[in-house]
Amino acid sequence: MSDGPRDGFWDELGGLCRAVGRAMGVTFVNFLRKPVTVHYPDVTRVYPDRFRGVLALTYDTETGEENCIGCRLCEYICPPRVIKVEMLKSEKRNFAKTFTLELYACEFCELCVQVCPTDAIVMMKSFDVATADRRELLLDKDRLHTLGQQFERSWATGTLLRDRQTPPKAAKAESAAHAKAAGGAE
Ligand code: SF4
Ligand code: SF4
C-alpha cells in the first residue's frame, strides 16, 4: 500500500534540495571568477578605437588654427538638430563665429563627424562629463576645443569615415564592366 501524501512530500523536498544545490553551484563558480566591474573613476577601462564618446572640436596641429570653417554641414546633417553654427567670413578662410552643441540631446550617431570636410569635429574616448545640471552640457566653441585637448581621440575623422565608404578601385572597375556587359546583353 502507498503512503500517498508522504511520497509527494519527499519528492518535493528532494527537488527543492537539488534546486538549491544547483543555485549554490552557480554562486560558487561566480564567486571564483575575476570581477568584470572596475572601481571607476580610480580605474578606467581601455576604450575601443571606435568608441563614440563626447564630441569635441580640433585645432590644426601645424598652424594651431581652429579646423572648423563654419560650413554648417554638421548642423544640417544632425538628426536631432543639436548643433548650431554661425559662419565668420574671412579673407583666406572662414571660421565658426559661434558653435554650440547640446550634448544632452545628442544621439552619438557620428554623422556630424562623417560629413565634416576639415576633420574639425571628432569624438573622444570618454563620456566623463556627467553632471546634474543640464546647462553644463550646452557646449560652446571654447568648451568643445577644451574637450578636444582633455581626452584621447577616437579613431574616426570625416576623412577616414568617407574613405571607408569609397569602394576600392578594383571593385569599381568590376561593377563598371558588369554594367557594360548588362547593357550589351539588352
Ligand atoms: S553625433 Fe549625431 S546627434 Fe550628436 S551632434 Fe553629431 S550628428 Fe548630432
Ligand atoms: S565642424 Fe566641420 S562640418 Fe561643422 S561647421 Fe565646422 S567645418 Fe563644417
Image (spheres, rainbow, N blue to C red):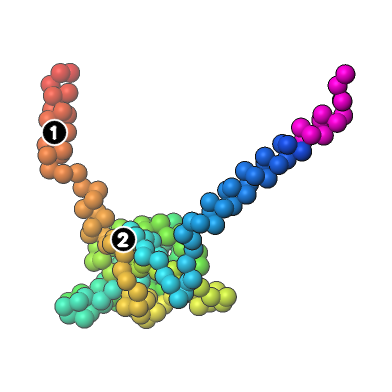
Q: Which mark is residue 49?
A: 2
Mark 1 close to ligand 2, CB under 8 Å: no
Above or below, comparing residue 182 to residue 100 in the picture: above
Three-letter code for the amino acid on which mark 2 is drawn = Asp
Residue nearest the viewer, comparing 42 with 168: 42
Q: Residue at x 57, y 48 (%)?
A: 26
Q: Residues within 10 Å of mark 1 (few under 14, many from 20)?
A: few
Residue 186 in view, yes or no: yes
Residue 84 is at least partly visible in this image: no
Whether residue 2 is in magenta: the answer is yes
The one nearer the camera, 161 or 50, is 50
Ligand 2 appears in which quadrant? Answer: bottom left
> Which segment is the magenta one?
1-12
**Amino acid type for the residue under numbered disc 1:** Glu
150 within the magenta span: no
Q: Is mark 2 within 8 Å of ligand 1?
A: no
Q: Where residue 174 is drawn, which disc sits there?
A: 1
